[in-house]
Amino acid sequence: MTTTDWPLWEVFVRSRRGLAHTHAGSLHAPDAELALRNARDLYTRRGEGVSIWVVPSSAITASSPDEKDPFFEPAADKPYRHPTFYEIPEGVQHL
């Protein structure tokens, strides 16, 4: 297997404790363990990372930027998501 046949991995790094992982970049590696080691060497050379995730690119499904408006518009046709849809019974005190 040549390096061009290796799968593509997406790398996410958490820079400090308590912060979310952010996408750092991509790399090719034959397996998850080597992808993790290569990600450490490539994206945390200055010791800024405390956690690394590597995910096969083929496992990621993303929304299209072209579908932004219809995909994320509020669901006005779903009234059950609004608090006014539900009636509170009279016996309920601390809701």
Image: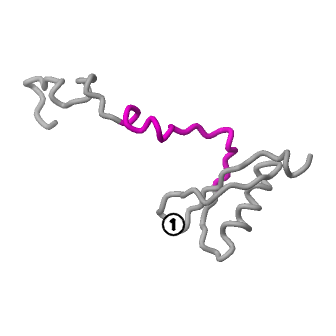
Q: Residue furthest right?
A: 1
Find residue 84 and report its image quarter.
top left
Task: Sort mark 1 into few (<14), some (14-19) or many (20+) by Cα contacts within 10 Å.
Answer: few
In the image: residue 38, left or right of residue 5: left
Farthest residue to the bottom: give it. Answer: 46
Residue 26 figure quarter:
bottom right
Q: Which residue is found at the position 71% from the left and 65% from the top? A: 40
Q: Quadrant of the C terminus?
A: top left
Which contiguous range is marked in magenta? 53-72
> Secondary structure beneath disc 1?
loop
- Measured as percent of width and height from the top left, residue 73 is found at 33, 34
In the displayed orientation, state which residue is furthest to the front.
66
Magenta span includes 65: yes
In the image, what residue occupies the spot 21% across and 30% down? Answer: 82
Report the side of 73 relative to 19 (left or right). left
Q: For this rendering, which residue is in front, 50 or 56?
A: 56
Q: Is residue 60 magenta?
A: yes
Going by the numbered disc 1, the residue's amino acid type is: Arg
**Vertical arrangement, residue 83 with respect to residue 20, above or below:** above
Residue at the limit of the structure toward the left, as seen here: 90
Please tell me which residue is depicted at 73% across the width and 55% down the height of the picture: 27
Mark 1 lies on residue: 17
State the image coordinates of residue 20 (x, y, percent, origin top left). Answer: 49, 58
Q: Is residue 56 above or below residue 70?
A: below
Q: Position of residue 24 (x, y in %)?
A: 61, 60
Q: Residue at x 80, y 52 (%)?
A: 29
- Depth check: give the residue in front, 36 or 78: 78
Q: Is residue 85 left or right of residue 9?
A: left
